[in-house]
Image (cartoon, helix red, strand yellow):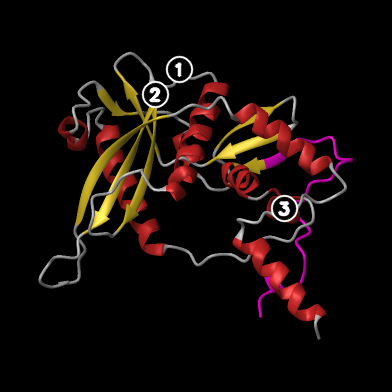
Amino acid sequence: MSDYYNSRRTRNIFDPKNAEPFKISRSKIDLFLNCPLCFYLDCRLGVARPPGYPFTLNSAVDALLKKEFDIHRAKKRPHPLMHAYGLKDVVPFQHEDLDIWRSNFKGIRYIHESSNLLVTGAIDDVWVTSKGEIIVVDYKSTSKEEKVSLDKEWQIGYKRQMEVYQWLFRQNGFKVSHTSYFVYCNGKTDREAFDAKLEFDIDIIPYTGDDGWIPKALADIRACLMNEKAPAVVKECDYCAYRKAARDVQSKK
C-alpha cells in the first residue's frame, strides 16, 4: 500500500503562525467552493481526498496540441482553426515565460496581499490579438456522440478555472480579453476500424468570463484556514457522505 494511505501529509499544510504566503492552486480554490470541509481537511490538516487515476490519453492530446500550436507560434502566424472560427486577428502568444506558465509545479502566480495567498495556475495556451489583448485558452478532450458544449452543470469547474487564469494574468499586468476559448477535442467512435489511431472533431468554444468572485473567495479561504474548527459537512459532497456512512457503520459495531 502506498504511503498516501499510511500517513497524513506533512508538506504544503497551512500554518496560522507562518507569515509566508500560502500557496494555493486554482484546483484548491475550486475544491473550497465545492466543499469547504474537504478543503480544510486537505490544506489545514493534510488529509486529501483519494487521488483519481490520471487521464493519460487526455494528457497526450494536450501535449500534441501544444506542439502543434507552438509550430505556428514560432512562425508568428495563426493556426488554421483560428481562421476556421473567424479569429482572423489572433495568433499564438509568444512570451519568454510561456513554459513556466504551463508548468504544473510553477504556473503563472500572484500574491494576493489581503489574504496572503500565493495563487497559482498552469495554463495550456495563450493567444494574442493584433491590439495586444491576450486570450486565455484551455484544451479539453473527451469522446461522446453529441456535440461538445459547456452546458453541463459539472462544467462550472471549467469556467471557474478559466476565470482564475484570466484573473492571474490581469494581476500580472496583462491586458486580458473577457472572452476565452476552449479547444475541445471529441474522439470519433463511428469509424469502421481503429487502425491504431484516433480521430477527433475539434471545436473552439468561446466563454466570456467574470473573475469578480475571486477576491471574496480568497478572503473566505483565508478565514477558513485560520479557523481552529473544521467547517460543517456538505450534504452534496460524495466524499463527506462516504466518511459519514463509514463512521455510522463503525459506531454500530
Three-letter code for the amino acid on which mark 3 is drawn: Leu
Q: Position of residue 16 (x, y in %)?
A: 86, 41
- The residue positioned 21% from the left and 63% from the top of the image is 198
Q: Could you tell whether 27 is left or right of 158 in the image? A: right
Image quadrant in which you'd find residue 214: top right
Front of the two marks 1 and 3: 3
Q: Is residue 132 above or below residue 92?
A: above
State the extent of the magenta-drawn residues as a range.
Answer: 1-23
Tell me if label 2 and label 1 are in contact, CB under 8 Å. yes
Residue positioned most to the bottom: 253
Rendered residue at 36%/44% (across/down): 151
Q: Quadrant of the C terminus?
A: bottom right
Can you say whether 173 is above or below 239 in the image?
Answer: above
Q: CA distance from mark 2 to mark 1?
A: 6 Å
Sequence-first disc among 2 and 1: 2
Q: Amino acid at mark 1?
A: Lys
- Residue 19 belongs to the span the image colors magenta: yes
Q: Residue at x 39, y 48 (%)?
A: 152
Residue 134: which numbered mark, if any? 2
The main secondary structure of the magenta stretch is loop
Q: From the image, tell me which residue sits under label 3.
A: 37
Sequence-wise, the earlier of marks 1 and 3 is 3
